[in-house]
């Protein structure tokens, strides 16, 4: 019952490779599932959680964190809805990632899972890295984006990633010592990366061994 966390620089193929690994291992791929569980626990819409994550560290997040007026919150969330601020989000994030890990047989994408599950005995942590230009090219090729749009998105997501880890009080998220495996995706294709991760996880946890 292994737990694979995949941390990545945006555009290094985390979603694509994560799904490939999950399919090969027969595991759950936890990405949007995390958003759904946070939304359920906080009693807010999934759209609100998605927006909150996208705006991490921005003016919107700071407004929410400073406890703006209840009237304003009601307009945003609607009637009979819960409330989500930075600390509530982080509390639920830790809880839900721990729940996924306890359930096992899961690939968890990002969201500080390598820190949250740092001491988990069944966790295997992977970091994907790539050069900025290669990541822009990946987004263009896999998501049918123009160069300018892909470049803006990679830059924006890099800032968001930095912001999330800052909220977690972490600055060493690209330190290879945090991970069991670090893949340079400019040197490794997706299929090879999938096979390397699956092989390493199976060997570490004796999966499939007689």
Image (cartoon, grey):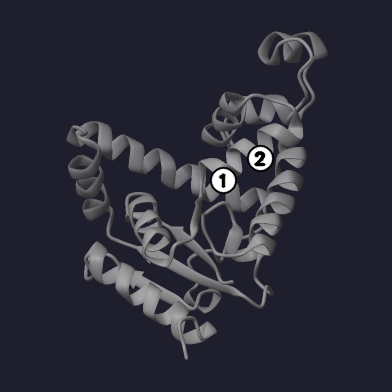
**Residue 205 falls in image quadrant:** bottom right
Residue at 76% across / 47% down in the picture? 91
Residue 48, can we see it?
yes
Kindly give the residue lying farthest to the bottom in the view shown.
210
Residue at 66% across / 60% down in the picture? 103
User: Which residue, given by chain and number where applicable, does mark 2 sit on?
Assistant: 37
Kindly give the residue lying farthest to the front in the view shown.
210
User: Which residue, given by chain and number where applicable, does mark 1 sit on?
Assistant: 163
Q: Nearer the viewer, mark 2 or mark 1?
A: 2
Instruction: Find residue 25 and report its horizontal and vertical position in percent.
Output: 42, 67
**For this rendering, which residue is in front, 138 or 31?**
31
Mark 2 vs mark 1, CA separation in Å: 22 Å
Disc 2 secondary structure class: helix
Residue 116, can we see it?
no
Q: Is residue 92 left or right of residue 134?
A: right
Q: Quadrant of the N terminus?
A: bottom right
For label 1, count other residues whose C-alpha is less than 10 Å away and answer few (under 14), some (14-19) or many (20+).
Answer: some
């Amino acid at each position: 019952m292994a737990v694979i966390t995949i941390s990545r620089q945006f555009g290094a193929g985390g979603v694509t490779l994560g799904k490939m690994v999950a399919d090969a291992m027969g595991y759950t791929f936890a990405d949007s599932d995390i958003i759904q569980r946070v939304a359920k626990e906080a009693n807010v819409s999934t759209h609100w959680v998605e927006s909150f994550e996208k705006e991490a560290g921005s003016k919107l997040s700071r407004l929410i964190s400073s406890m703006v007026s209840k009237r304003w919150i009601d307009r945003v969330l609607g009637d009979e809805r819960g409330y989500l601020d930075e600390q509530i989000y982080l509390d639920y994030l830790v809880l839900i990632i721990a729940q996924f890990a306890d359930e096992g047989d899961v690939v968890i994408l990002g969201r500080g899972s390598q820190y949250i599950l740092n001491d988990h005995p069944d966790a295997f942590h992977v970091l994907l890295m790539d050069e900025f230009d290669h990541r822009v090219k990946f987004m263009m090729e896999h998501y049918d984006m123009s160069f300018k749009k892909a470049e803006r998105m990679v830059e924006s997501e890099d800032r968001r990633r930095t912001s999330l880890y800052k909220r977690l009080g972490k600055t060493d998220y690209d330190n290879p010592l945090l991970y069991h495996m670090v893949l340079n995706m400019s040197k490794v294709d997706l299929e090879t990366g999938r096979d390397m991760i699956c092989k390493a996880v199976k060997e570490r946890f004796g999966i499939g061994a007689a």
